[in-house]
Amino acid sequence: MHRSAHHPDSALPVVTLAIEERHGRTFARAELDWKGSHLAATGVAYRHPSDNWPRESGQGLATARALSDLAKQVTALSPATS
């Protein structure tokens, strides 16, 4: 499992990303801690054995899906602007 985290001062968001490969699938989990809130999202990618993509492509796709889901959650929590 790969993990990365950014730990700046507490006023800034902290994002933690974990990537794991199991049973031919790549799973990514993105977590956001910011201003007392905690959000979590997941993304999954599957590489068919006949695909010619590099193995790392699944990591990128799963991560993008997790971050996209996280962004939707943040947008849903944000107050509407006029």
Image: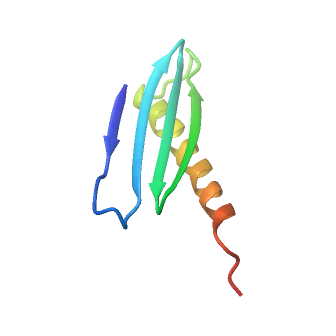
Question: For residue 19, which quarter of the picture?
Answer: top left
Q: Is residue 80 left or right of residue 37?
A: right
Residue that appears at 53% across and 36% down: 62
Could you say which is closer to the camera, residue 57 or residue 34?
34
Q: Is 47 placed left or right of 81 in the picture?
A: left
Which of the two residues, 42 or 61, is positioned nearer the viewer here? 42
Q: Residue at x 40, y 31 (%)?
A: 56
Horizontal placement of 45 versus 33: left or right? Answer: right
Where is residue 75 shown, x and y percent of the image? 64, 64
Vertical relation: 18 (above or below) 32: above
Quarter-of-image position of residue 10:
bottom left
Quadrant showing the C terminus: bottom right
Residue 67 appears at what percent x and percent y?
A: 53, 49
Specify the color scheme.
rainbow
Q: Quadrant of the N terminus?
A: top left
Q: Measuring 34% from the left and 30% from the top, which residue is drawn there?
A: 2
Number of callouts: 0
Identify the residue at the far bottom of this view. 82
Q: How far from the left and from the top, in percent, is residue 57? A: 46, 33
- Between 67 and 46, which is closer to the camera in this rendering? 67
